[in-house]
Amino acid sequence: MDATEGSAVDAARAVRVTLGRLRRRLRENFDRAELTASQLGVLTRLDREGPATVSELAAAERVRPQSMAAAVGAVVERGFVRRDPDPDDGRRQVASLTAAGRDLLVTSRAAGQGWLADALAQRLTPEEQRHVLEAMALLEKVIA
């Protein structure tokens, strides 16, 4: 392994660790309903991609259909998701985000973003904040 590869490995590790810690801190400020990661994943995916069956959600999240059925059931019970008959196959049901689920995501995202904006403003200089934006642009290149 040459120096460039070692540097890439070090950068990958640093990004993974830091983003993991940031994700946990955001979740502390974001998750107003104390949802599990799988329940939050259901809401987020339905918000981003629209109605889906449990099988489609399970495949997208790479979990077993039984596990996804439990997560969907939990958010249905709390009123964040509803189930309707599939228009193409009446034997199946399609899960959709309710207004309460959408409201939860909006307020939770605002809370997490507000915490992060405050933390950036309080702990970083304007120049450091520009560096954060530059780093985010580089990470976008990596995932594009």
Image: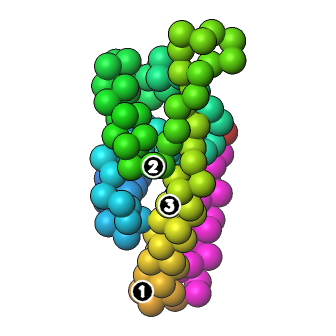
Closest to the camera, between mark 1 and mark 3, is: 3
Give how far apart the Cα atoms at labels 1 and 3 are. 28 Å
In this rendering, the answer to whether 58 lies above or below 123 is above
- Number of the label disc, if any, that sits on residue 123: 1
In this rendering, the answer to whether 35 lies above or below 62 is below
- Number of the label disc, if any, that sits on residue 104: 3
> Dot 1: within a 10 Å radius of its alpha carbon, few (fewer than 14), some, or many (20 or more) residues?
few
**Which mark is first along the chain, 1 or 2?**
2
> For the magenta stretch, what is the residue range?
126-142
Q: Please state which amino acid type lies under the numbered disc 3.
A: Leu
Side (left or right) of 21 relative to 121:
left
Say whether marks 2 and 1 touch (CB < 8 Å).
no
Give the camera-side residue of 136 and 42: 42
Side (left or right) of 89 relative to 55:
right
In this rendering, the answer to whether 138 lies above or below 75 is below
Q: How is the image coloured?
A: rainbow
Give the camera-side residue of 15 and 90: 90
Is residue 78 among what the camera can see? yes
Chief SS of the magenta region: helix
Is residue 13 among what the camera can see? no
Q: How far from the left and from the top, in percent, is residue 54?
A: 47, 23
> Mark 2 = which residue?
79
At a point 38% along the width and 18% down the height, the residue shown is 65
- Number of the label disc, if any, that sits on residue 8: none
Closest to the camera, between mark 2 and mark 3, is: 2
Closest to the camera, between mark 2 and mark 1, is: 2
**Which mark is first along the chain, 3 or 2?**
2
